[in-house]
Image (cartoon, grey):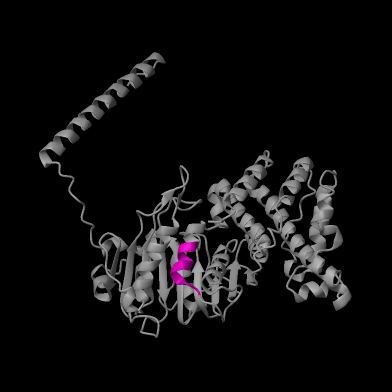
Amino acid sequence: MSENLELEKTLWQAADKLRNNMDAAEYKHVVLGLIFLKYISDAFDELYQKLEATKHETGADPEDKDEYTAERVFYVPSQARWKWLQGRAKLPTIGKDIDEAMDSIERDNAALKGVLPKDYARPALDKQRLGELIDLIGSITLSKGGNGKGKDVLGFVFEYFLGQFADAEGKKGGQFYTPASIVKLLVEMLAPEAEKRVYDGCCGSGGMFVQSEKFIELHEHRKGKISIYGQESNPTTYKLAKMNLAIRGIDAKIELGDTLMNDKFPELKVDYVIANPPFNVSDYNINKAETHKWKYGIPPSGNANYAWLQHFVSKLAPFGTAGIVLANGSMSSEIATEGEIRKAMIEADLVDCMVSLPSQLFYNTQIPACLWFLARNKTETTKFRNRTNEVLFIDAREFGTMISRKQRELTDNDIFNIADIYHKWRSKELFAEYKDIAGFCKSANIQDIRKNNYILTPGRYIDFKQVEEDGVAFNDKMKQLTLTLKEQMQKANALDNEIKKNLEKIGYNL
């Protein structure tokens, strides 16, 4: 959770008030486009001031584009700079000014071509409210006491707003945003290392990559040292990903296209796959010619789950690992070829860990979900214990805290406990000795899984947790329960009679 959360909440409440009657899906691009514009303008201005102050010694020209390219800072033309635009915020032409600013930025920065929103001049967008929104976003300052964290504030605000828009959009919101606590759990369990490759074939707005960078920065005290590859089929979401990564200073290769039909990275092999593909998609196509991907069985035409699983397996390098979010049904489905594919993947020793998640974690669906962790090679290494033909099962259904009437979130403590048991199971260090915990986790071997017909639902394997007796005698407990049930049945009968009377008053009899 961001340390600037109060700032983010305040900004969101203010921005949401300015939304008026605009749909959240439409307003999202208005707001996020402006936050991005503020970010690149502030970053440009910071370097501009530095170049201006030292130009007599260095001979550098603060208006030379090459000076900014060399420092991996976007060049912002004069009439696209935030100060100039904010000065025009009250003018009726402000929408046209912003569109022209976005155009000019794309012309001068090839990496942003076709990415920025350019529909601010449309008549339906209230220009007075647009001006107020510019003033609001202008209040986010770049510099925070000279501690070098200023640009991060805009990154946190962008990320927070993505989550809030996902919530506001409901079902559609989940198409571009995976809840932060799920992303954090995936990353904490995979624990990506610097100088490695990370891939997401359905990358949404890029949250998996942002969290991976955060993890490395936190644990290795450096930034930007992983190679990132992503693909996204939705053009609008693709643009959000490009902006989200750029605002965090993350260099990534993100491609637009249908991953299962037209893989933009056909030869790519990576160390980590982190992904949340759309659940149970039935209207999809696969490239059946890619036989190297379907070596465990041709996925059924009615559900894409096992197409995604096999696609991600095909991307793993010899010691690569993957963390994938899927619907619970994927753990036990026997529809068409799914059961046979699951069996083949288990027999190939690809499944490393299965996690049952609690309900109500997602914005877009109440379908229960799970995490699949896949590993290319589970034999003993210098770091990891030999877990050949073993699978760790974790039941986290009772975890999480309700943060609203409809939304649950995994706490940092939940994430630590789940990730910690996985790391202990994998580690060969004596101080990290793994033990099965009734009601929570179980290490099962291939024989156990065969006996359960290759079903991977954790509840099939984890021992029941002993429930402590409350000291009340059985007969006494049954008397109390029976009395309660009798009272409830009497209330139900009274309600039924009231309903009948009300219906009779308007001419209907039961």
Residue 457: x percent and y percent?
32, 63
Is 293 on the left or on the right of 234, as rendered?
Answer: left
Q: Quadrant of residue 507?
A: top left
**Which residue does the image show at 69% across and 59% down from the upper left?**
145
Q: Residue at x 31, y 66 (%)?
A: 455
Quadrant that contains the C terminus? top left
Does any portion of residue 300 appear in the rendered image? no
User: How would you classify the magenta stretch by its main secondary structure?
Assistant: helix
Please provide percent x and percent y for residue 492: 28, 27
Q: Nearer the viewer, residue 182 or 172?
A: 182
Q: Nearer the viewer, residue 282 or 123?
A: 123
In this rendering, position of residue 30 left or right of residue 274: right
In the rendered image, the residue lying farthest to the front is 145
Where residue 203 sits: x, y (%)?
Answer: 57, 65
Q: Which residue is depicted at the point 27% across and 71% down?
A: 444
Residue under the point 57% across and 55% down: 3
Of 85 and 393, which appears nearest the observer?
85
- Residue 12: say if magenta: no
- Asked if residue 266 lies left or right of residue 112, the reply is left
Q: Position of residue 430 (x, y in %)?
A: 31, 78
Residue 178 visible in the displayed image: yes
Question: Residue 433 appears in which quarter of the rendering?
Answer: bottom left
141 is higher (above) or lower (below) than 404 = below
Q: Is residue 170 left or right of residue 53?
A: left
Magenta run includes residue 191: yes
Magenta region: 184-192
